Amino acid sequence: MTQDHTTAPDAAPASPAPWRPARTVAVILAGGTGTRLGLGIPKQLLKIAGKPIIEHTLAVFEAAPEIDEIVVLMATGHVPDAQRIVADAGFRKVTKVIEGGETRNDTTRIALDAVGEGDVNILFHDAVRPLVSARIVRECVNALWTYSAVDVAIPSADTIIQVDADDCITDIPVRSRLRRGQTPQAFRSGTIREAYRRAEGDPDFAATDDCGVVLRYLPGTPIKVIDGSDENIKVTHPVDVHLADKLFQLAAAQAPRLTDHRSYAEELTGRTIVVFGGSYGIGHDLTELARGYGAQVFPFSRSTTGTHVERAEDVAAALKTAFEATGRIDHVVVTAGILEKGALAEMDSETMDRLLHVNFVGPVTIARQSLPYLQQTKGQLLLYTSSSYTRGRARYALYSATKAALVNLTQALADEWAEFGVRVNCVNPERTATPMRTRAFGEEPEHTLLSSEAVAQASLDVLISELTGQVVDVRRAPGEQVAAVPAQPGPDRSELSADA
C-alpha cells in the first residue's frame, strides 16, 4: 500500500498510485469547554433530545458502514465521562478515548498519533455537530477514492462582507462562490500528515481548520467540497441548544423493515403485547397483525373491556390480566385518543377534561403502571403523536397540545428509563383513514389518506427495533389509496386513534 506523499509545495504527484486504505477512522473532536454556553460542563456532554450531544454524534458514525474505527479526543479532565457514555451506549467501533491538546494543532497531532501509521482514511468531525447525516459521512468517504482532501460546506444564504480594523467595508465577495464550512473534513492519511509536517516549520502556524492547513501548505492539492446540510449545525451558543433539540424532535427516525413473514414470526412469537385503544383503527389493525405473527396480544378499550386509560386502577387491572396469562409483558402500545374540534374559548369543561385526561393523563398513567413489567423484559412503550404536534392547529388546540406533550414525554422517558433497558418511542402518522378521523372531518379523498394498516405495520417495525427516544414518521407511499372508513356510532371515542 502507498501513501499520497506530495513531492513539491505547489503540486501533487503527477501520477499518484491508486489509493488503497487499510481502514477508515472517524476522529471525534470533543475538546470544547462550553464557555460560550455558560456551562459548568463541556458542551458535548450537555443533553439534547434525552442524550448527551456526543452520544448522538458517536451514534451516527457507529451506524455508518463506511466507518471502521472511532477515536474520541476529549476535553481535559472529562475522559471518564466520555468513556462511560461509550460503554453505556455499547459503541463497539470506539477504540480510544483520550485527551485532546491545548490547541487545534496539538489535538490533530495527537489524533494522528492515535490513528497510527499506514494508509488510512481519516475523518475529523466536531463532537458538537450531532445532526450530521449518514449521507454526508458516506459521500466524504467515497470522495477519498478520487481526492486526498475533502471538505463539507453549504451555500451562504447571507451576503458576506469584509471589513477593516474600523469596521468599514472593504470588499463584498460574490455570494455564489462562497460556502459555509462544516465537518467532517476527510483526508488520506499521507496528505494530512504531510501538511502538518510542513506546517511545523512555520513559526506563525495556528490551525483552526484542517482543510486550511492542506490549502496553505500543500497548495497544489485539490480539496473536494461536498454538500453539507442546514441541519448539521454546530452547538456553540445558547440558541444552538434549542435549535438542535428542536431539530432532533422534528427528525424522522426510520425503523428497519423485515423482509418476510417468517422473520416477523421469529421476532414476535412468544412476545406479549398490550394495546390500549385496540377496538378500532390503528390499535385494532396492530392487534390483528401482531397476532398473525404469533404474538400474544391483549387489546383493552372503554367499549370492549370497560378500560378507562386515565384511571390507574383500570390500567393496573389490564396489565395484570396480560401478565397473569403469559407471565410477561414485552410491549405496551397506547393508541387511545380522542379528537374534539372547536374553539377553545367555546369548549365546555367536560370536553376539555375528557381531551386532557384521555390524550395525556392516560398515556402518563399507562407509562407509570407499565414500567415494572417492561423492566423485566427490557421492553418498549409505544406512544402516538400527530403532525399537529409541530404547530398548534386552530379549532383543535388541546388535541395539538397533548400530542406535542407526548413527544416530550417520549424523549424524557427514553432518557429516564435507559438505565432499566426500557425503550420508549412515538409514532407520527400522516393523516390516517380511521373512524375517529372520519367522525371529525367527514369523507375525504381516498388518495390523501394513509391506511391504518400501514401505520400498524410501521408500529410493529418500531416495536421490534432497537430505537428509543425517537419520533418515527409514517408517510403514505406514492400512489397508495385506501377505502373511506365510516365513523363508528355511539359515544365511545377514546379508543379511536388516528393522526389529524
Image: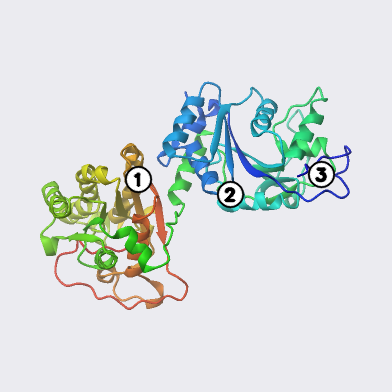
Name the residue tied to disc 3: 221
Q: Secondary structure at mark 3?
A: loop
Judge the density around disc 3: few (<14), some (14-19), many (≥20) Cα neighbours within 10 Å: many
Quarter placement of the C terminus? bottom left
Quarter placement of the N terminus? top right
Earlier along the polypeptide chain: callout 1 or callout 3?
3
Which of pointers 1 and 3 indicates the residue nearer the eye? Answer: 3
CB within 8 Å, label 1 to label 2 = no
- The location of residue 424, given as percent across then percent down, is 33, 47
Q: Secondary structure at mark 2?
A: loop
Residue 385 is left or right of residue 355, and the answer is right
Residue 408 circle label: 1
Name the residue tied to disc 2: 230
User: Who is closer to the viewer here, 178 or 316?
Assistant: 316
Judge the density around disc 2: few (<14), some (14-19), many (≥20) Cα neighbours within 10 Å: few
Earlier along the polypeptide chain: callout 3 or callout 2?
3
